[in-house]
Structure formats: structure tokens, C-alpha cells
Amino acid sequence: MWPLIKLLPQKTNFRFVAFAKFAAVISALAVIASLARAMIPFEPPCGGLNCGIDFTGGTLIEFSTAPKAVDLAAAREALTRLELGDPQVQGFGEASAAMVRYQPPAGADVNETAGQVRAALTQALGQVTFEQPDVVGAKVSGELFTSGLMALGLAILLMLVYIWFRFELQFGIGAVVALFHDVILTFGVIGFLGLEFSLTTVAAILTVIGYSMNDTVVVFDRLRENLRKYKRMPLREVIDLSINETLSRTIITGVTALLALAGLAIFGGPTLFAMSLVLMFGIVIGTYSSIYVAAPVILLWGVKRGDEEAEPLKPASVRP
């Protein structure tokens, strides 16, 4: 009975394609809802997302009240008396550490505003140790936002070229449709949960793209082998067979990654929580899209079956 993984069936025979239409409806509704949440209201730079200071511009100051814990409520109340744009206070790491993010008033001196913030926090919290302010200008934040979107678009384009080169065009289309599905739904989760959209979040989305593509390639590779092996089997049955044959590998890989990210989300503090949550969602939705988005696109588009037979594996030579 041990290891417990032996309890999992070695061979499954799930009919995934039979639920493809139902899954397509669910995915379409989820994509529409995610687009609406991420883009409405349509205001630069991030629409309906909770833009971080990387994209909106502003000032970030880290401070510590060691050895006592930070009174976040008192800090927030002190900042509300100042004329600041969107002041936010959150703890990170140890209980005595926190950070404040804000946008200085229009036309105000950045250093003078930072001094007012330090004075207000010192008056509210007592002895406070401040780090050097981190200032992001409006021009720099706009460039960062544009660069982040370009990175996402370039990653998807390169994935299409790679799949097209390795397989066929219809495989590439299925993979890219799945990638767009995953990225849009990830943006929707960020919007619905109110997570901060920053450069760290962009890095998490790029990682989701890589994981989703990796899982899709595994399914496509097995599908290509089975298409050569079972020439007269209906395409929907070949797709089901290929997904079932890679299912155990997909589950084991996904669960392993989720366990690692769960530990990061629990013990990594608020700074890494959003990134960990986005990655966990991306792994789940990436696995789903490989089965119910990428593979059904192949079924709709059709695929050319080669004339060559699959080569059998040769047994390794055994030395006497």
C-alpha cells in the first residue's frame, strides 16, 4: 500500500471530449466576465485592475517599529489626514515591518511630501525607522506598463512559432487559443480578488504561460504519436486516449507545484502572496485548458495523419 501513489489507477478511460461543448460554454462565459472585470472602467493605465505603483507612479517607503509590532490602523488613520493620492499601508515579513504607498499631490515636491509622511507616521507610531523612499515617475511607470504588455504578447507569439515549427499550424492555433484563455482568466482573477497588478504579477503571468504551454506540448506530443499509431481510430477517441495516457503525469506535476506554491503563499508574507495565488490559479487553469481548450480546437480544425507508421521502441542491449 505504500507509497500511497500506488492507489491511483495506472490507466484511466475518461471521456473528456464528450464534455467539450459544456466546457466551451463555461470557458466562454468566464472569458467574457474576466474581460469585463479587467477592462471596465476603461481608464488608463490598468482599467479595472488594482494598479501597483510600478504602473501608476508614486512613492513607496518601507519602515519598521521594532521591537514592537506596527499598528497598521493607526498608520492608515495618520495618512488619511494628508492630501495623498490612494495611500496604502500594509505589513510584510516581520510584524514590526510595513510599507506605505502613495501618490504625491499634483505639483508637490516629492521629498517634501515624503518628509510629511515620515512625520505623520512618527507621531502616530512613536519610534520609527525609515528606509530610503522609492519613487516611480509617471513616464517610467508608463514605459513599464507598455513593456509588460509587450512581454506578454511576445511570449504568446513565440509560443505559436514554436508549436508551429514542432507540430503543425492547427496545433499552434490550439495552443495559442489555450494561452489567451489562460491569460484572460488570470487577469480576471486578479481583478475579482483585488490583487495588485505590478511587475511581479506580470512575471507570474509569464510563468503561467510557460507552464500552460509545457502541459499542452506533453498532450500534443502524445496525440501526434497516437495519430501515427491508430490511423483508423476516430479523432475524438485518439484525443481521449492521449489525454488519459498523460493524465497521471499532469496530475503529479501539478500537485507538486501547488504544494510548493501553497507553502510560499502561507509563509512568504503579503509581498509574495499575490504572486503565489496567481501561479496556483495558473497551474490549475493551464491543466484545464490543455484538456478542454487546446485539444478540442484540434478536433474542430482537424489534423493531417501521416502515412508513416510509428516506430516501435527498441529494447536496450543487455550485456552478458
Image: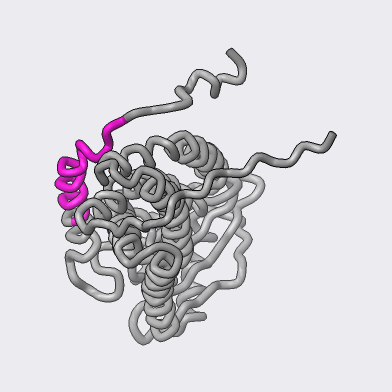
Q: Does the magenta segment cover residue 30? A: yes
Q: Residue drawn 47% across and 59% down?
A: 210
- The picture places residue 83, in percent across and down from the top left corner, at 34, 71
Query: What predominant SS class does the magenta segment belong to?
Result: helix
Q: Does the magenta segment cover residue 97? A: no
Q: Residue drawn 25% across and 43% down?
A: 234
Between 180 and 190, the one lying in front of the other is 180
Between 122 and 299, the one lying in front of the other is 299
Q: Residue drawn 36% across and 64% down?
A: 168
- The picture places residue 119, in percent across and down from the top left corner, at 51, 67
- Quarter of the image for residue 144 reads bottom left
Residue 281 visible at all? no
Compared with 18, 209 (above or below) is below
Q: Residue drawn 51% across and 59% down?
A: 99
- Quarter of the image for residue 217 reads bottom left
Q: Locate the N terminus by quadrant.
A: top right
Compared with 96, 160 (above or below) is below
Rendered image coloring scheme: one colour
Q: Locate the C terminus by quadrant.
A: top right
- The picture places residue 86, in percent across and down from the top left corner, at 34, 65
As drawn, the residue found furthest toward the top would be 1
The residue stretch that appears in magenta: 14-31
Residue 186 visible at all? yes
- The picture places residue 63, in percent across and down from the top left corner, at 58, 60
Compared with 273, 315 (above or below) is above
As drawn, the residue found furthest toward the right would be 320
Total number of numbered discs in the rendering: 0
